[in-house]
Image: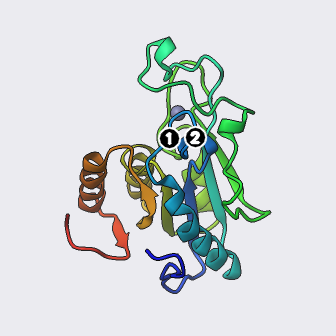
Amino acid sequence: MREAEHAVIPPLQVGDALLLIDLQNDFFPGGALPIARAETVVPVLNDWIEAATAADLPVYASRDWHPPDHASFINQGGQWPRHCVQDTFGAAFRDDVALPPRVIPISKGAAFDRDAYSAFDGTGLASALHQRGVRRLWVGGLALDVCVQATVLDALKAGFETHLIREGSRPVDERDGREAVTAMRHAGALLEPDAPES
Ligand SMILES: [Zn+2]
């Protein structure tokens, strides 16, 4: 996507919600668990935030929110470097993401002894969305092959029409990212914009 281009946003309607995954400093270049070219998702998702806000739709933003000695960290026997420790700069939302004042944060992975990749895991998000009348979800963020994938699969299981904002997500690993897209699509996710099977 060229600098001056804007994301093409389909018409949004009542019952839609935007769900942004883990747009936190630690997942961007310079952070503890940086994802290559993560910064490219920001202008895309900012266009989506603007469109959702203009349509008066809810915007949810998940965050990895780990205690200092979380089970997912390498020094605790996990597989990730120490990242997104509660109340640190690394755990904060990146400041060029134009989150609206009424953004609804979702904290996950806060238990000492277990990890949570999906924004639905242990958060009560599915009931909150159902209560609010949300039927269709637009999902983007980081990382495509980890937390975005887990979230999209859970969203489908919970009965939401689920769209992946393809240009608004980046993987930890390119090949895993392609496989994640295939898995999400096979589970019933729709790609935005639609793209041929890769
Ligand atoms: Zn984590």
Q: Alpha-carbon neighbours of circle 2 within 10 Å: few (<14), some, or many (≥20)?
A: few
Question: Mark 2 is on which residue type?
Answer: Gly
Q: Residue furthest right?
A: 101
**Viewer can see residue 134:** no
Name the one closer to the observer, 195 or 133: 195
**Could you say which is closer to the camera, residue 46 or residue 56?**
46
Above or below residue 4? Residue 118 is above
How was the colour assigned to the protein in this rendering?
rainbow
- Mark 1: amino acid: Pro
Whole-angstrom CA distance, mark 2 to mark 1, is: 6 Å
Numbered disc in front, either 2 or 1: 2
State yes or no: Cβ of the residue under disc 2 lies below 8 Å from any atom of ligand 1.
no
The residue most toward the bottom is 11
Helix or strand or loop: what does disc 1 sit on?
loop
- The answer to whether residue 192 is left or right of residue 72 is left
Is the C-beta of the residue carrying label 1 under 8 Å from the nearest atom of ligand 1?
no
| Residue 41 x/y as whole percent | 51, 62
Residue 168 location in percent, x, y?
47, 64
Q: Circles 2 and 1: CB distance less than 8 Å?
A: yes
- Report the disc number at residue 193: none
Q: Quadrant of the N terminus?
A: bottom left
Residue at horizontal 53%, vertical 81%? 6
In the rendered image, the vertical position of residue 64 relative to residue 53, given as above or below: above
As drawn, the residue found furthest toward the top would be 76
- The residue pinned by badge 1 equals 34
Residue at 26% across / 55% down in the picture? Answer: 178
Q: Please report the residue visible at 30 percent of the width from the left and 50 percent of the height from the top.
A: 174
Residue toward you, 112 or 121: 112
On residue 30, which mark appears? 2
- Assess disc 1: are there few (<14), some (14-19) or many (≥20) residues with their C-alpha within 10 Å of its C-alpha: some
> Residue visible at 56% across and 73% down?
16
